[in-house]
Structures are given as C-alpha cells and as structure tokens.
C-alpha cells in the first residue's frame, strides 16, 4: 500500500460508479420484466445447473434511523412486519426454485439491509430454515451477515454461529461519540470491542468492520482517535467508505447539518490518514475501500489474482450467478441483471399475483459483456491483457478501444497506469492507480455521461 499525499488525491478525485456491476444499476430499465428473469432462470437450470450460486437476502427493517444511510430501509419497531416479510420471502424463493430447481448449491450467502439483526433469533432461524429448504448451502461456504452492534449481544452471536453464519460485518462508522450523535447512531466503543471479542471466541472465519470518513463533526484529530481504536480492535477486514452527501436523493441525509460536514481538503486528509495508519498496522489494500490482514482469504485472493466483485463488494468467490431475494434486491443470472420492487406494497402485490417481484433490469449486449470483462479485470486484478480480451471476445483491442487507449495514456502521465514497454500489449494499474481504480475503470464505461456523475460518490 503506497503512501499518498492529499495533493495527489485532490488532483485525481472525481465522482464515479463503484462498479459492483457493469452496466451500473442506474442503467436498468422498466422494459425488463419478470418474464425476462424467468427465461434466464430456465436457461440457467438447464445449462449451468452444477455451478454454485451466490445468494443475497435483503432485510429492510431498522429500529432506528441513521442519518447518513442511503440504503433501502424501513424504520419500525413492530416485529409483526418482519413476520409478514418472511412469509413473502418464502413465496419469492419458491417462485425462483420452481424455475431453477429446488436444492441448487449455494456457496455464498449474504444477509444485508437495513439491519438483518433486526430479526430476532426465532425469525432468523425461520429464515435460514426456509433457505435450506429451497437451496443447498455447501459445506465450507461463505455465509455472512451485516450486524448493527446495538441489536446483538454475545448470546445472539452464539445463535448466529449455530445458524451457520461464518462471517460477520459490524457497522461501526466512527467511534467518536460526538460524530455518532450527529448521525443518530450512538454505540459505545466498549460495546463493539466486547462483541468482537465474543465473536473471536466463537471462531467465526472473518470479522469485518465498516468505517465512514467525511461524516459531520469529523476532523483529522477525532478520526485519528477512531483509527487508533480500529487498529486496537484489529478486525480481519475493514471497509472504509467515503460518505456521499446526496440529500436530494436520500431523504434521511436532510437531517445532517451541511455546515458540520468536513471540508473537501479535510475529507481527503482523513483518507490519507487512514491509508497511512492501516499500512503501518500491516493491512493489505485489497482494492478501493477494502483492506484485510495478510492471512485473510481476501488478501490471499488479491495476491493470487483471484479476486472477484459483486454487489456486496470484493469477494473470493468465483463470478457466479447471484440470486437476490427481498425488496429492492439486485441479482445477476447469465447476461441479465434484475432488481426487485423497491416498496413493500409493490413487492407484496407482485407475489400475491404469483409472479416474481421484478421492477426493472437489463439484458446485456455483447458490448456490455465485453466492457464488463475489461472493467472487472481492472477492478479485481489491476491489469489488462489485450490478447486475452481478443481471444475471449473476438475483437481487435486497439481498434475497438482506440479512444479509451488515448485517455489511458493521459492516466499514465498521472501515474495511475503503466503500459508494457516496447509495444507490449498489456496494461497494469500502479499502486496509486489501485487506490483510484474506479477512475481507471471509468475510461471503459460507455454509458457514463459527464452529466450523470453527480449520481455517484467521490472516487476518493
């Protein structure tokens, strides 16, 4: 992980997609219907039935509103809503497996939200029993759940282990009490430390902690203390996100006082702080905002060029099809993306009519699939082999991407990429470029228009 100054970050920072997919979700359209997803499931059932699946389940409920949140969530303290939701999740899963076949092997499961730990132990057990009835969870798979530390204790962690979860992700965001009050998410640091200690005693495979820089009332002094506590906690993985203040799109963010947000130069200084501290603490920069200890499977996959990327971020799992269940959930089957209805009324209404609750999606063109391959090679391996792309897609790389290669020559002058010497037909992302790899990938994004970039977060 290279040392980076704020002057470099400021010069190269921009808005851009995170490329958990390509094309990105803003390109999905309502011409895509449940019939398109059904066709994709049927093709998958016949042609690729032995390949493992990835499974995502969206649990939208939270007991309390976090002001920074941009997720699809429902604030409630009424668990009768969870009971109704679980029954509809089962309906959706049964409609999927009616086309796909019951018992298909799943090697990766992720529960996101919202706050999946809004569900109590009985409700979580009901959900996992249902999933095991519809799918086969492979031994040794990656089974993860996002955790709001305010909703669990050591006994609940023991229940999660018994239910088969092997990876935990704790939403911390910041340890500073004043920052926590500003974003309406107060959770004492001691509580998080106790939970991580209990999780280690239960032998979970990996523990992740989420942090956010750029939050209100943060500054370099308070963030230095948070980073010091993070290093003391020493999770296996760290996700360090830059806060994207988009109150016109995300209503909860309107409760944040704009004057309390750090200035752009302070925000970049905090990022530089984090990079320096994590480097000194021995963390590997896996990519973008992901860091891991050297012996974590994510860091090992990075060294061995086996990283993959999906809607949950970087992964060690192969680029497999993703079944997505729940309101607003996004899945990928073969050459299609599909997204479920974003409101409970629409989600429940579709299922009541016996159809999959698809609201929009996209059928990838040949160009989309080519560019997806190129972008994911950059995002996951930090390199491009022109000849390999030509063999896979039947193109002349230099001719097809003539404009993109000119732009990349500019990025080479900025120190983000390096072309092979003496006319070699490969491209490598540099250490600096790996930090800003989104900016490199954006060169190949045919859909990205300058006027659309305000829809995305900052690259740094």
Image (cartoon, rainbow, N blue to C red):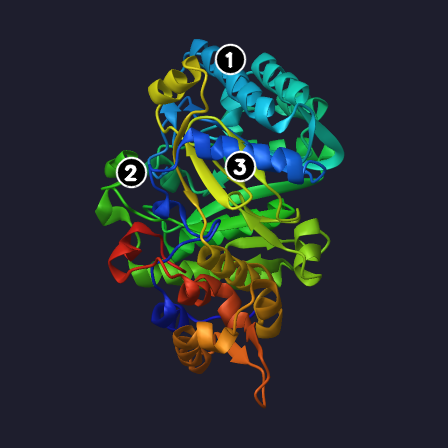
Query: In this rendering, is residue 421 above or below 428?
Result: below
* Relative side of 236 to 210, left or right: right
Q: How crowded is mark 1: few (under 14 residues within 10 Å), some or many (20 or more)?
A: few
Q: Are marks 2 and 3 in contact (CB under 8 Å)?
A: no
Which residue is drawn at the image coordinates 42% and 25% (left, top)? Answer: 357
Counting from the top left corner in percent of width and height, residue 332 is at 52, 41
Mark 2 or mark 3: which comes first in sequence?
3
Quarter of the image with the C terminus is bottom left
Extreme residue toward the right, this view: 139
In the figure, residue 160 lies in which quadrant?
top right
Q: Do the residues labelled 2 and 1 touch (CB within 8 Å)?
A: no
Mark 3 or mark 1: which comes first in sequence?
3
> Which residue corresponds to mark 2?
250
> Which residue corresponds to mark 3?
40
Q: What element carries label 3?
A: helix
Q: Residues within 10 Å of mark 2 (few under 14, many from 20)?
A: some
In the figure, residue 78 lies in which quadrant?
top left
Quarter of the image with the N terminus is bottom right
Residue 87, numbered circle: 1
Q: How crowded is mark 3: few (under 14 residues within 10 Å), some or many (20 or more)?
A: many
Counting from the top left corner in percent of width and height, residue 275 is at 52, 62
Q: Are marks 3 and 1 in contact (CB under 8 Å)?
A: no
Mark 2 or mark 1: which comes first in sequence?
1
Q: Nearer the viewer, mark 2 or mark 3?
A: 3
Question: Alpha carbon of mark 3 to alpha carbon of mark 1: how far?
Answer: 25 Å
Looking at the rendered structure, the number of numbered marks drawn on it comes to 3
Q: Is mark 1 on a helix, strand or loop?
A: helix
Counting from the top left corner in percent of width and height, residue 389 is at 58, 67
Question: Alpha carbon of mark 2 to alpha carbon of mark 1: how far?
Answer: 28 Å
Which residue is drawn at the image coordinates 62% and 17% (left, top)? Answer: 130
Question: Alpha carbon of mark 2 to alpha carbon of mark 3: how far?
Answer: 32 Å
């Amino acid at each position: 992980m290279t040392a980076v100054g704020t002057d470099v970050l400021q010069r190269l920072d921009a808005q851009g997609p995170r490329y958990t997919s390509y094309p990105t979700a803003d390109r999905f359209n309502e011409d895509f219907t449940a019939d398109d997803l059904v066709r994709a499931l049927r093709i998958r059932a016949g042609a690729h039935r032995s390949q493992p699946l990835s499974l995502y389940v969206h649990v939208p409920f939270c007991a309390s509103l976090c002001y920074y949140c941009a997720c699809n969530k429902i604030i409630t303290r009424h668990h009768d809503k969870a009971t109704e939701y679980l029954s509809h999740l089962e309906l959706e899963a049964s409609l999927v497996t009616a086309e796909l076949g019951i018992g298909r092997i799943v090697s990766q499961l992720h529960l996101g939200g919202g706050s999946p730990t809004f569900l109590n132990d009985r409700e979580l057990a009901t959900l996992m029993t249902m999933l095991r009835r519809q799918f086969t969870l492979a031994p040794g798979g990656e089974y993860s759940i996002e955790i709001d530390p305010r909703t669990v204790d050591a006994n609940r962690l023991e229940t999660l282990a018994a239910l088969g979860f092997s990876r935990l992700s704790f939403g911390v965001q910041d340890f500073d009490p004043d920052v926590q009050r500003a974003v309406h998410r107060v959770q004492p640091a001691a509580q998080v430390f106790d939970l991580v200690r209990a999780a280690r005693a239960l032998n979970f495979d990996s523990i992740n902690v989420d942090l956010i820089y750029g939050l209100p009332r943060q500054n370099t002094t308070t963030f230095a203390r948070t980073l010091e506590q993070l290093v003391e906690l020493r999770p296996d993985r760290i996700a360090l996100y830059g806060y994207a203040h988009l109150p016109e799109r995300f209503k909860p963010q309107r409760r944040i006082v704009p004057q309390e947000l750090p200035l752009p130069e302070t925000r970049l200084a905090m990022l530089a702080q984090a990079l320096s501290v994590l480097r000194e603490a021995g963390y590997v920069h896996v990519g973008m905002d992901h860091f891991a200890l050297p012996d974590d499977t994510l860091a090992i996959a990075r060294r061995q060029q086996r990283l993959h990327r999906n809607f949950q971020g970087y992964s060690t799992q192969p680029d497999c099809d993703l079944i997505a269940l729940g309101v607003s959930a996004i899945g990928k089957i073969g050459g299609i993306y599909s997204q479920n209805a974003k409101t409970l009324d629409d989600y429940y209404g579709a299922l009541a009519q016996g159809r999959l609750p698809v609201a929009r999606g996209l059928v990838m063109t040949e160009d989309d699939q080519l560019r997806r391959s190129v972008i994911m090679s950059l995002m996951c391996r930090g390199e491009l082999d022109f000849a390999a792309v030509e063999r896979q897609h039947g193109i002349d790389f230099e001719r097809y991407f003539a404009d993109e290669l000119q732009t990349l020559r500019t990025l080479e002058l900025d120190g983000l990429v390096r072309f092979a010497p003496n006319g070699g037909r490969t491209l490598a992302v540099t250490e600096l470029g790996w930090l800003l790899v989104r900016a490199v990938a954006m060169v190949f994004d045919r859909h990205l228009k300058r006027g659309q970039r305000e829809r995305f977060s900052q690259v740094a």
